[in-house]
Amino acid sequence: MARVYRCSGIGCASTLRDVARLFIRLFFFAIPALSQSLTVGVEGGVRLTGDTPPYGTSHSKRYLVGPMVEVGLPFHFAVEVDALYSRLGNRFFIPLIANESDIGTIANSWEFPVLLKYRLPLSRRVHPFVSAGVEPRYAYGHVNTIHYGYYPSDVTFSSTDWHAHDGALVLGAGAAIQTGHLRIAPEIRYVRWAVPHNPDTNDIASYLPRSRNDEVRILLGIGWSRK
């Protein structure tokens, strides 16, 4: 279940700082565990599956992009932490007689995959891998509503700020290609969101409903690696 709060400017900034501190702590916690390598870079890609709602139009962008850190561990294992940004949104029109509503939702989404990876030792330069982990998500945005009454002049506007968080399970597979200190890692990820069939106002899906719980992504990681 996601938690939803009314968002003030100070409250949103405070929450963003908390999320940033968590990412920084994960990074510095991983440094003492270094035994194989450290890779710092960027991760980007696209969703292959859309999020078109049963009623309405999706305004979401398919891209995801953000920083990544990977720490090598013994026995060919590694831990990767990403911070992926994307833009989400949708629009609904409710055509009731003398009570029409045009509802648009936009949101900035930050996802923080934490993945345990196993790298297959098949080649010195090419390392196929599989991964599994969890993906907390934090989103914040606005619900903008235009309401049309019986008379042409009876038009009202309203806007509500909101922010919420939920999470998903992640499975992935790919290959890391090493050339000197440069590492390029294409991969595919399957993401399973915990979206209820009938979300209430306490769920992020109440603001950004998805047509499915399952999501498939193609990503490319580019980083500088220190052995």
Image: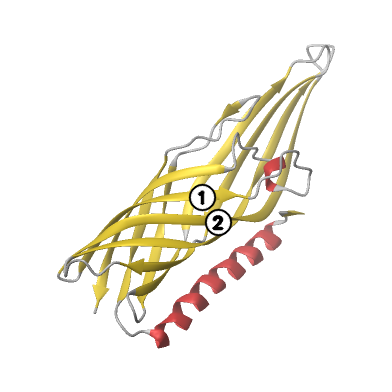
| Badge 1 element | strand
Total count of labels: 2
Q: Quadrant of the N terminus?
A: bottom right
> Which sits in the foreground, 64 or 74?
74
Q: Can see residue 131? A: yes
Quarter assignment of residue 156: top right
- Residue 202: x and y in percent read 77, 49
Q: Residue at x 41, y 57 (%)?
A: 66
- Residue 8: x and y in percent read 72, 56
- Residue 212: x and y in percent read 59, 37
| Crowd band around label 1 with a 10 angstrom C-alpha radius: few (<14), some (14–19), many (20+) | many
- Tag shown at residue 169: 2
Q: Residue at x 71, y 47 (%)?
A: 161
Q: Is residue 99 left or right of residue 135?
A: right
Q: How is the image coloured?
A: secondary structure
- Residue 215: x and y in percent read 50, 43
**Residue that numbered label 1 is attached to:** 191
Alpha carbons under labels 1 and 2: distance apart: 6 Å
Q: Is residue 81 left or right of residue 152?
A: left
The amino acid type found where label 2 is placed reads Leu
